[in-house]
Image: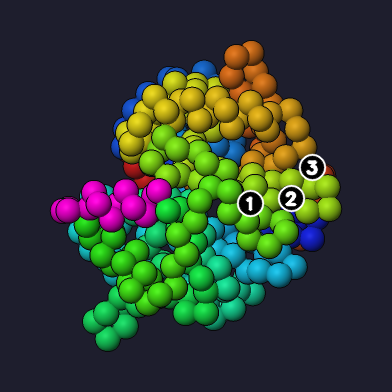
Amino acid sequence: MQWTVGRVKITKIVEITSVGGSRFILPQGTSEAIQAMPWLVPHYATPEGRLRMTIQSWIVETPSHRIVVDTCIGNGKQNRSVPIWNNLDKPYLDDLAAAGYPAESIDTVLCTHLHVDHVGWNTKLVDGRWVPTFANARYVFGKTEYEHWAAHSPEGEHRAVFEDSVKPVVDASLADLVTADHRIGDEVSLIATPGHSPGHMSVLIRCDGAEALLTGDVAHHPCQMAHLDWSSTADSDPVQSIETRKMLFSRFADTPTIVFGGHFDPGRLVRDGDAFRLLACQIPTDRTAHITGTVEFPRAVSHETSDE
């Protein structure tokens, strides 16, 4: 599925789709609470109040760059806290190539933050060693984010993720540690959005008068736009994450900007009293949409799981 933002193309590559409960990441989002927000149906929730979420990458192709934003969980990774994320065998790279973006054609990998489900395909296993998947790319990590995890990943999942999906990139001298005012070409800039993680960044795309925002994990699900105080169980600073949601959503609500979530499909953000709603964009049948128009979603190729 592909959207255009001026001369920039944004393509969705799905690793895992889930439809289910919320106890793992958003315990406040009970079925009853989700059903009280009927605007979430059908794109973001089922009529029964089950959340629709994905683990996905956004491919951003500008006139000068091919950028992968966030790289999912990855194949063959171990010591993950979610059992089904261990030893995955997904056709992510095949899907990437089928969309017109073989790994060798990517020149930039941008991680909004360094959590397990955003860095996995940074590396792949070759002859028993984790090596960079995108050998021709520079990997862009937030300096604050990288320094935090370099100092605070002594054991368990954090250590495993850092050692198999981050450190090999740094050891290969492919990493650029940047501040939140960093730009990639003329069209892509970063916004500091801490709270979910210490150095979390969102991505702003501007081209030919059109605009898109890739939020990363500022919100895991659009229900957090209606309930700004619903912080994720994975947020490093739940209070700061609330303030970041208020700041970011206030800035882009009621504008033509299309909001692309780290784990949900894009939409237009509108004010709703003291909070917000996300009005799902729809993609036409040719699977390409200009963000200035009304579009209709087809179903993405996905590999579904269910969280009861």
Which residues make up the magenta segment? Answer: 144-157
* Mark 2 vs 1, N-terminal side: 1
Q: Which mark is residue 206?
A: 2
Crowding around mark 3 (Cα neighbors within 10 Å: few <14, some 14 to 19, many 20+) is few
- Residue contact at pointers 2 and 1, CB within 8 angstroms: yes
What residue is at 83 percent from the left and 53 percent from the top?
A: 208
Task: Kindly tell me whether residue 72 is visible in this rendering.
Answer: no
Q: Label 2 amino acid?
A: Arg
What residue is at 41 percent from the left and 35 percent from the top?
A: 195
Tag nearer the camera, 2 or 1 = 1
- Residue contact at pointers 2 and 3, CB within 8 angstroms: no
Real-space Cα distance between discs 2 and 3? Answer: 19 Å
Tag nearer the camera, 1 or 3 = 1
SS for dot 3 = loop
Residue 85 on image: x %, y %: 30, 57
Q: Which mark is residue 189?
A: 1
Please give the residue where the numbered disc 3 appears in the rendered image.
294
Magenta-drawn stretch, dominant element (helix, strand or loop)? helix
